[in-house]
Every structure is written in structure tokens, then in C-alpha cells.
Image: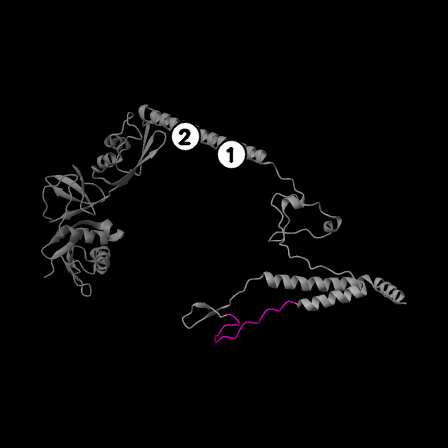
Amino acid sequence: MRKCMQGGKRKAVKNKTAKTRGAEVRVSRAKTRVVAKKKAAPEIRKPRRTDGGRAQAEPESGQDGNAPPRRAARAPEAPQKKEAMRSVKAQRGERTEKPRRAFARREPEADTALPPRSVEDSGKKKKRGSKGALSPQENGVRQPEEGAGARAAGEASGGKKEKRISRHVRILILGGLLLVSLAALLWVYTATGTLNVAKVEVRGNEVLDADYLRSLSGITRDTHLLKMDVKAVESAILSEPYVAGVDVSRQYPNTVVLQITERKPSAFIIQNGKFNLVDQEGMILESADAMPPGLIEIRDLDTQLLFPGMEVSGLDFATVTSLLGSLPPALREITTAVGLGAKGLYLEGKGTLVIYGEASELPRKNTIALLALSGLVDRYGAVEYIDVSFPDHPVIKPVGAG
């Protein structure tokens, strides 16, 4: 009877599902690991900080101290309990599990070959880098060999050096050709007669002859256009009293242009039987033997010996020229002389003396003088003088009047 009961129990135990047995095995293994770790772990003291900021070790759980003792580690199961469990399992017919020893996990060596990837792993996602991009090896890109890359880099650097050297050589050659060309042109234009003056053009002259001005400039056919001294040419032409200004310019390859500005005579001064022509600024232009037509004589002016090129100056001359400059064309046509006498400025026209006095209100005085000379002289006949010193009260004195 007893044997039959034991056999039934064994069959019942064997009929247990694999799930129940696996759960019990896992529980027993977990308990065994916890106990082994607690035995192998050293006792750790938790540091604490004092008022000075330095860490100190706390006392052990069994020692005296202000801090509460650390929680004691879970005590391993008592041997009696283990024996009881084994006896119960032996009665039930179960296989007793020996506690596994805690082995340190052995890390694979660096040069150990990795096992081939299984079919399950191939379906998983490939690991990516920090930025999520696949590496070239994982992406299937074939990397060039180290020797081939070095050779390619060397060939590229060598090609760049050759190109750089060839470019420098071309620049040097072009620079040398340019220098040689410039030197040849400079020699042609300076050492040969290619740029010698062949023509001198004179412009703006009315009184002076063009050939006279060309000879005065000193320019010849042997004059080099680049070596010509422009300042010397200008000074030579300005020595002529009739020339007020000159502009000397070059026109390549072999022409010089002289732009002349002439002076115009406005009056003449008789001295030593010579008629000395003078312009508005007082420059004596020339000394003529005959009276020049269309010019007004300046009288009663104390001057030095006059000659062409001399400049007459002084207050008296400036006063007389102010009257000359203010004369209208109609009055200038009938005026024969102006001067500065005892009663001041005066002019003479149609044989009649017109007294101006001071050099003030000249336009009004000119208008009265023109009316008197063109109308009243013809009505009254001979007139001794006309006084326009006071334009508001002009005076006309016929000949023979008291």
C-alpha cells in the first residue's frame, strides 16, 4: 500500500508542467546569487561631512555614534531551514539543486574572433554612429587600400607642383618679353630720329607773322619731340610784347602746336618823334614812325623813355586808361586824344575840349559829351570847351563868349 502511494506521488510530481518547474528553479538560483554577492561584497563605510567640509567615515552599525546605523545586510538562510527544504524535496522525489558558485564573468580577449552573425541578428537594425550615419564598411562602400591612396595623393601633389612651376615659367617669360619690347621702343624713340619735329603749327595770331613766331620759338627739325623743353619755348615766345600768352603742345608723332594769345593796342604815346603803341595794361607793343590809324593819343603824361616791351605804370596812367576803357564806340570814333591836365581828365573830339574833372560818373559824362559833340557843336559852330565835371549842370562855352 505504501509503495503504491509513493508511486502515485512520483507520477504527480512528474506531471507538473515545465513552467512550474522553471519558475522554482529561477527562484532558487536568484536566492543563491544574492547570498553569494552579500558574502563576497566588502563592508563599505559611508562618508559624511562635518562643519569643516571634510568627509569622515561613519561608524559601523554596531559602534557608538550620532548617526543611525546602516541597514544590516540580509542574513543568509539558516542551515536548519535548508536541510528542512531538502528533506521535503527528497520526500516529494524532486531533484535537489546545488547552489551555483559565483564565477567572475570572463571578458573576451581583444583578438578573439567574433562568432558569425546569426539569422536573427541579421534582421535587427544596424548600429549607427553618434550622428546616426552608417560607417563606410557597414554601408558597403569599398575603401581604397592605404598604399593606393598614398600613391594617388603623391601623384596629385606632384601634378600641382608641375602646374605651379609651369605657370611661374610662363610669367617670367612674358615679363622678360615685355621688358625687352619696352627697351626696344625706348631706344627707337630716343636714340633715332623717329620723333623729330617735322611741323610747327601756329594758331591765334593776327598781327604777328607765323614764320616769325616759329623762328622765335627755337624749334628746328633736329628737335626731338620728347626731349623738347616746353618751358624754354614758352619763355622765348613770351619775349615778344604782342604775345600775352602761349600754349605749347605735342602732337605725335612729329608735330608741335603753338596757340598764341595776342595783345591789342588801345592808344599811343608820342615820344622823341616815335609813336609808341600801348595796350590797356600799359605794355609798349612797338615804336612806329607813322601815326597808327584808329588809335587815340595819350597826352600830358610824364613817363620815362619808352621802348617795346616796357610796361607803363602809375596812378596817372591808370586814371587815363580808365577813361579810355569807359568810352562807347560812337564817342571813341570822334575822340582824338585823352589826357590828364590841370583841371583833371579831359578828351578832345572834333577839335573841341571836353573837361571830365575827376574819374567819377564816367558813363553819364560820356553820354553828355557825345550829345554835345554831335549836336551842339554843329549848331553853335566853334566851341571853346564843354565842361561835364558836374553832370547835373554841364557847361558849354562857345568861342568868343565872355
Q: Amino acid at mark 1?
A: Ser
Q: Secondary structure at mark 1?
A: helix
Cα distance between the residues tagged 2 and 1:
27 Å
**Nearer to me, 182 or 170:** 170
Q: Which mark is residue 226?
A: none
Give residue 395's position: percent from left, percent from top: 16, 62
Give the x, y percent position of residue 221. 29, 25
Magenta stretch, main secondary structure, is loop
Q: Which residue is mark 1?
A: 157
The magenta span reads 60-76
Category of crowding for the residue at label 1, using alpha-carbon neighbours closer than 10 angstroms: few (below 14), some (14–19), many (at least 20): few
What number of labels is visible?
2
Visible residue check, residue 275: yes
Magenta-span inclusion, residue 68: yes
Front of the two marks 2 and 1:
1
Name the element at disc 2.
helix
Residue at 69% from the left image edge and 68% from the top image edge = 80
Residue 163 sits above or below residue 293 on the image = above
Q: Would you say 161 lies left or right of 358 here?
A: right
Q: Amino acid at mark 2?
A: Gly
The percent position of residue 203, horizontal first and vertical second, equals 32, 37
Q: In the rendered view, tell whether residue 167 sits above or below residue 12.
A: above
45 left or right of 123 in image: left
Q: Where the N terminus falls, by quadrant?
A: bottom right
Provide the residue designation for mark 2.
175
